[in-house]
């Protein structure tokens, strides 16, 4: 999970400004092979979408 979060940070955080918790939440979703990410947090939603997840609502 931490390696994936680090990769997400290097690729997306500089331009989108995600916080550590955002990176960890999306990394966990990816590690569990989720296809959909549910969040009302705009930073998490942007990161999840950029990482290839379908974002709801």
Image (cartoon, rainbow, N blue to C red):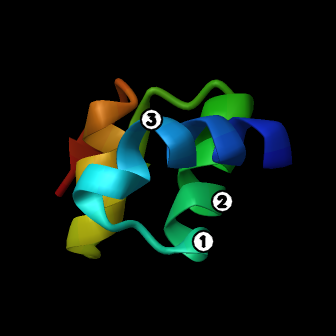
Contact (Cβ within 8 Å) of mark 1 with mark 2: yes
Lower position in the chain sequence, tag 2 or tag 3? 3
- Please identify the quarter of the rendering in which residue 25 is found: bottom right
* Residue 32 shows in this picture: no
> Comparing marks 1 and 2, which lies closer to the viewer?
1
- Kindly report the distance in space between the C-alpha atoms of the residues bearing marks 1 and 2: 6 Å
Q: Label 1 belongs to which residue?
A: 20
Q: Quadrant of the C terminus?
A: bottom left
Contact (Cβ within 8 Å) of mark 2 with mark 3: no
> Comparing marks 1 and 3, which lies closer to the viewer?
3
Q: Quadrant of the N terminus?
A: top right
Q: Secondary structure at mark 1?
A: helix
Residue 11: which numbered mark, if any? 3
Q: Residues within 10 Å of mark 1 (few under 14, many from 20)?
A: few
Q: Label 2 belongs to which residue?
A: 24
- Please identify the quarter of the rendering in which residue 17 is found: bottom left
> Residue 10 appears at what percent x and percent y?
53, 41
Contact (Cβ within 8 Å) of mark 1 with mark 3: no
Q: Residues within 10 Å of mark 2 (few under 14, many from 20)?
A: many
> Comparing marks 2 and 3, which lies closer to the viewer?
3
> Residue 54 appears at what percent x and percent y?
28, 33
Q: Secondary structure at mark 3?
A: helix
Q: Is residue 14 above or below residue 54?
A: below
Residue 32: which numbered mark, if any? none
Q: Residue at x 34, y 48 (%)?
A: 47
């Amino acid at each position: 999970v931490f390696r994936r979060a680090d990769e997400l940070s290097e690729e997306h955080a500089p331009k989108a400004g995600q916080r550590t918790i955002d990176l960890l939440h999306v990394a966990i979703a990816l590690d569990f092979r989720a296809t959909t990410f549910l969040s009302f947090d705009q930073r998490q939603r942007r990161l999840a979408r950029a990482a290839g997840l379908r974002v709801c609502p």
